[in-house]
Image (cartoon, helix red, strand yellow):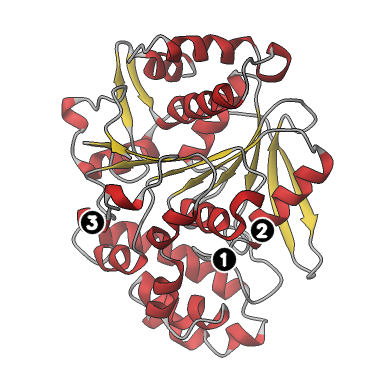
Amino acid sequence: MAERPGGFQAPWWLRHSHLQTVVPHLDPRRYDVVTEAIRHELPDGDFADVHWLNREGTGPLFILLPGMQGTPGSTYIRCMLWELSRRGLRAAVLCHRGGAVPNRRAPFYHAGFTEHLAWLVTLLREREPHTPLYAVGFSLGGSMVIRYLAETGHASHLSAAAAVSLTFSLSSTARRACEGINRLYQLRVLRSYQRVARLKAHLPEYTSRLGALKGLRSIRDFDDVFTAPLHGFQDAEDYYRHCSSRQFLSRIEAPFLILNAEDDPLVARDTLPAPRELREHVRLELTPHGGHLGFVHRWSSGLCYYPPSRLISFFLQEQREAHESLSQDVVGHDLLALEAGDARGGAGEHARAARAAQ
């Protein structure tokens, strides 16, 4: 179902979509959280970098997947880690293969790349067979989570999952990235892609394509020259057609929350799914404002970032419905307090928890 969350309120002076998108990156607060970075060797000779929060702890574990060229240092990831850390919870940030750090093999990652998420879920399930696992994907990371859920069905091993600022049509988003001020966002991502491609110039698959790097003017160009052919697609449109997330919504079996803004500059309104496309356990929450990965929220003593507290509340709700009672040893006193607040239906509880974290 699609609905508007009651807890999010953008300040009047931050209701422009581009301000919402940019302001979080200008936030001077550091949201420092101690994580443990571990490089895990994979059977195919490549590696996966995972940043662990409270790795040796107990209780539910949140798997976080950044957006396109996102890292554990991205503002939305740091804010999420801060909130989880404040509550004594655990997390694993799965860095995209060939994102900030070049990987060893020619293929890197894309919106339909689910192999690393499947690997991490399997690793965690083998180590901790009874630990509830939750996954949160941001932007392109959300597309990965959706496709993983569609591919695995009831065997996903995820108790619930969520996506923030999800792009439903990759082709539409690629077109919008070439319009107006969106070109500045595109340029930033494209330069990051180009930098990583140059660092992999020693690989034959890249050597033959380096001459085209300077001529690339859009993410679609990069997908045509690199992403599509290196991952078995005919061209960018073929890649977009096979990996856009909207087509996978009907195959999701786990409880799923999608948090998007109606004014997202990269998501056209006509790409949003119709209510009939959403199963009863798939919840689409649309805020009037929020931009792309923005959601800067007004609170009495300042500004805060809305998604972390909303996401945690959603997962608590799912856990409460799955079990008649929750143990403090599993989720902690703070989480039980938040759950009780949600049960009372207080519209401001999400904002209050987020502000307390900052």
* Mark 2, secondary structure of its residue: helix
Q: Is residue 143 left or right of residue 121?
A: left
Which image quadrant is residue 22 in? top left
| Residue 293, image x, y percentages | 37, 43
What residue is shown with label 3?
A: 268
Amino acid identity at mark 3: Ala
Give the number of the disc on residue 294.
Answer: none
* Mark 1, secondary structure of its residue: loop
Q: Is residue 356 above or below residue 117?
A: above
Find out whether the residues at labels 1 and 3 contact each other: C-beta distance under 8 Å: no
- Quarter that holds the N terminus: top left
Q: Is residue 284 left or right of residue 274?
A: right
* Mark 3, secondary structure of its residue: loop
Q: CA distance from mark 2 to mark 1?
A: 9 Å
Q: Is residue 160 left or right of residue 34?
A: left
Find out whether the residues at labels 2 and 1 contact each other: C-beta distance under 8 Å: yes
Q: Earlier in the sequence, mark 2 or mark 3?
A: 2
Q: Residue at x 28, y 55 (%)?
A: 266
| Residue 64, image x, y percentages | 58, 43
What residue is shown with label 1?
A: 109
